[in-house]
Image: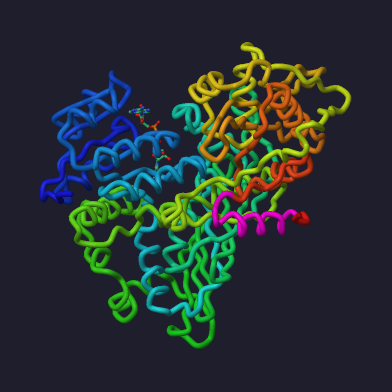
């Protein structure tokens, strides 16, 4: 891949966030060659202001027709992964807005796309670049905090009004329980713990207290995620984009054996403060600004970029972060530095938040966070699989439902309720297109839903899908099992799964299988109880199933 001096960049989402990168791109020698946005009426103005030669309303057209070296992706969250993968496939370098993705599954796709592509991927986490955060990073790297074992990160940014302007936020940032927007709080902390990563998380929220203008409740306010790192440190992350309170965008704390840092919470007279054993043997606060200004520590540890920042950096948004992330992106593309927030750093900052969403669904259970570096090994990642034992083909399970619920076939008029249910159950990127694809392979009378009689709500579902694989010739897959968390504990999932197994057996299938993820523990327990057995089809399965059964306290046969 060439690394041209004059980097031709295309910005997608150029009418929104994308436009804020323009000055920094130019200052770092990149050329905004094309802009893209679906808001055609505002595109002329964006192109003029950003000095772009070309404009597009279709992203694919921009990639195919424009002579680009790189794209900057400033579109809503669900577009980050698909647009990044498309660009990487075209060999274009990518700077993607945060977070990297909206589901573990699509993050895995992104990691694999990065492996296949020679182009560079960087995530645009700007808060790691602010002056105080860079200084703390350098002190931590120099060992001045000693061993670091505790940190806190908070993102307290009330944006209920912004939800109504940028409507995608209402679902992706304030519609799903858990930490939906983790990177601004977790990202800087991870740079203060070099070489470490989050290995497990748990999450709970503070309940629902606010409604949007349509009277719909937002997700649980002030979710808090606890993270354990590989080296045993504890990190607390709180993200709140709903609660009414004085603004305090980001605050951080870091504790090591030889020092502590606490950023300002924005209150009257509050300042960033620090104590280091190096400054005084007796613990007492020093103002961070004074320590930075001090010849000794500031001069020795503040990098040149922030000692003598360019004018553009001082003007840039997010405490200068919007400038320095672009500077690093351009320098990475040119091969001058190693990319500081490459795909695995991006995953380290993004995946804990996604797993926290599963944790809160499972009442705050500690769950493992996958390591994206393992998705790059010899074996590509594969889901766990389970099979229905052949000796039980003659004794299919009986679907049993509690009073007030009815098992029936899916009907076309269930479409909206069905999509809502599947998304609420944790398959956030399941959309209409995917449903249409599934409908092509589902067996007749093989698409089950459970309806609550009084409310008419669709509260559980599963389907019998004709899905032969090499390892399952003529195989049928129990697919898309989902249950409404508000109706959990009533074994509705068990009932729909039993119905699917019976349907396959009636149709003459002898191989019935399912695929799932290691962290979907309640679902796996349901499958085990019903009679499905782990299917060890690869060498890593033995160990993965051992870990799953241990967590479920399930005796393995
Ligand atoms: N790093 C930060 O500090 C920071 C700050 C704000 C937003 N963000 C992130 O930036 C992204 C955009 O946020 P925003 O506030 O600018 O949202 P926005 O809705 O104001 O802007 C998104 C833009 O993308 C355009 N768009 C939507 N779909 C498109 C498509 N298919 N093709 C081309 N353009 C399309 C929209 O028309 C809009 O102009 C989000 O992912 C958000 O999380 C990050």
Q: Which residue lies furthest to the left in this view?
A: 5
Picture quadrant of ligand 1: top left
Q: Is the magenta stretch mostly helix, strand or loop?
A: helix
**Residue at (30% x, 45% y) in the render:** 95
Q: Quadrant of residue 336?
A: bottom left
Lateral position of residue 19 relative to residue 334, left or right: right
Confirm whether the magenta stretch covers residue 221: no
Lateral position of residue 330 relative to residue 557, left or right: left
Display coloring = rainbow
Residue 247 seen: no
Residue 7 seen: yes
From what the image shows, is residue 232 above or below residue 117?
below
**x then y, percent, for residue 510:** 67, 32
Confirm whether the magenta stretch covers residue 550: yes
**x then y, percent, for residue 546:** 67, 59
From what the image shows, is residue 533 above or below residue 288?
above
Q: Give the range drawn in magenta.
A: 537-552
**Residue at (60% x, 40% y) in the render:** 515
From what the image shows, is residue 450 above or below residue 170?
above
**Residue at (68% x, 46% y) in the render:** 206
Lateral position of residue 525 relative to residue 290, left or right: right
Seen from the viewer's position, the closer of residues 428 and 555 is 555
**Residue at (86% x, 22% y) in the render:** 404
Q: In which quarter of the image is residue 557?
A: bottom right
Seen from the viewer's position, the closer of residues 124 and 344 is 344
Lateral position of residue 279 relative to residue 60, left or right: right
**x then y, percent, for residue 219:** 62, 37
**x then y, percent, for residue 24:** 22, 47
Disc tally is 0
Q: Residue furthest bottom?
A: 281
Seen from the viewer's position, the closer of residues 503 and 525 is 503
């Amino acid at each position: 891949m060439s690394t041209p001096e004059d980097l031709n960049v295309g910005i997608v989402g150029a009418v929104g966030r994308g436009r804020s990168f323009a000055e920094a791109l130019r200052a770092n020698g990149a050329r905004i060659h094309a802009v893209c946005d679906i808001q055609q009426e505002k595109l002329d103005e964006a192109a003029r202001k950003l000095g772009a030669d070309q404009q597009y309303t279709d992203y694919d057209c921009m990639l195919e027709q424009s002579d680009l070296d790189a794209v900057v992706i400033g579109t809503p969250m669900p577009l980050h992964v698909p647009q990044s993968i498309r660009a990487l496939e075209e060999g274009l370098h990518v700077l993607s807005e945060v977070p990297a993705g909206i589901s573990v599954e699509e993050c895995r796709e992104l990691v694999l796309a990065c492996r296949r592509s020679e182009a560079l991927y960087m995530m645009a986490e700007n808060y790691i670049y602010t002056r105080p955060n860079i200084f703390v990073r350098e002190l931590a790297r120099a060992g001045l905090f000693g061993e670091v074992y505790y940190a806190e990160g908070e993102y307290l940014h009330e944006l209920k009004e912004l939800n109504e302007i940028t409507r995608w936020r209402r679902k992706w940032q304030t519609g799903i329980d858990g930490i939906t927007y983790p990177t601004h709080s977790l990202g800087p902390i991870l740079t203060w713990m070099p070489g470490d990563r989050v290995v497990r998380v748990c999450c709970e929220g503070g309940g629902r207290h606010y409604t949007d203008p349509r009277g719909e409740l937002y997700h649980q306010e002030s979710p808090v995620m606890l993270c354990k790192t590989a080296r045993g440190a504890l990190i607390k992350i709180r993200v709140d984009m709903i609660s009414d309170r004085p603004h305090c965008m980001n605050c951080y704390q870091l504790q090591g054996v030889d020092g502590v840092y606490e950023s300002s919470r924005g209150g009257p007279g509050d300042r960033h403060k620090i104590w280091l054993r190096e400054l005084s043997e007796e613990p007492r606060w020093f103002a961070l600004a004074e320590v930075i200004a001090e010849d000794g520590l500031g001069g020795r540890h503040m990098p040149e970029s922030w000692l003598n920042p360019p004018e553009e950096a001082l003007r840039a948004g997010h405490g200068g972060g919007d400038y320095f992330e672009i500077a690093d992106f351009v320098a990475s593309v040119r091969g001058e530095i190693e990319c500081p927030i490459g795909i695995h750093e991006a995953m380290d900052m993004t995946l804990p938040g996604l797993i926290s969403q599963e944790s809160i669904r499972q009442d705050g259970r500690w769950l493992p966070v996958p390591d994206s570096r393992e998705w790059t090994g010899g074996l590509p990642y594969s889901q766990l699989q389970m099979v229905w034992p052949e000796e039980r083909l003659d004794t299919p399970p009986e679907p049993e439902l509690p009073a007030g619920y009815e098992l029936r076939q899916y009907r076309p008029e269930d479409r909206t309720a069905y999509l809502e249910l599947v998304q609420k159950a944790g398959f956030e990127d399941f959309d209409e297109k995917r449903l249409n694809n599934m409908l092509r392979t589902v067996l007749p009378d093989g698409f089950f839903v459970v309806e609550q009689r009084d409310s008419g709500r669709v509260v559980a579902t599963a389907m019998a899908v004709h899905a032969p694989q090499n390892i399952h010739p003529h195989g049928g897959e129990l697919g898309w099992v989902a249950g409404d968390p508000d109706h959990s504990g009533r074994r509705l999932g068990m009932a729909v799964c039993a119905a699917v197994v019976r349907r396959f057996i009636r149709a003459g299938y002898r191989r019935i299988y399912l695929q799932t993820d290691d962290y979907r523990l309640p679902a796996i327990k349901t499958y085990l109880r019903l009679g499905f057995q782990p299917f060890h089809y690869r060498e890593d399965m033995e160990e993965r199933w051992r870990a799953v059964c241990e967590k479920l306290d399930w005796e393995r046969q």
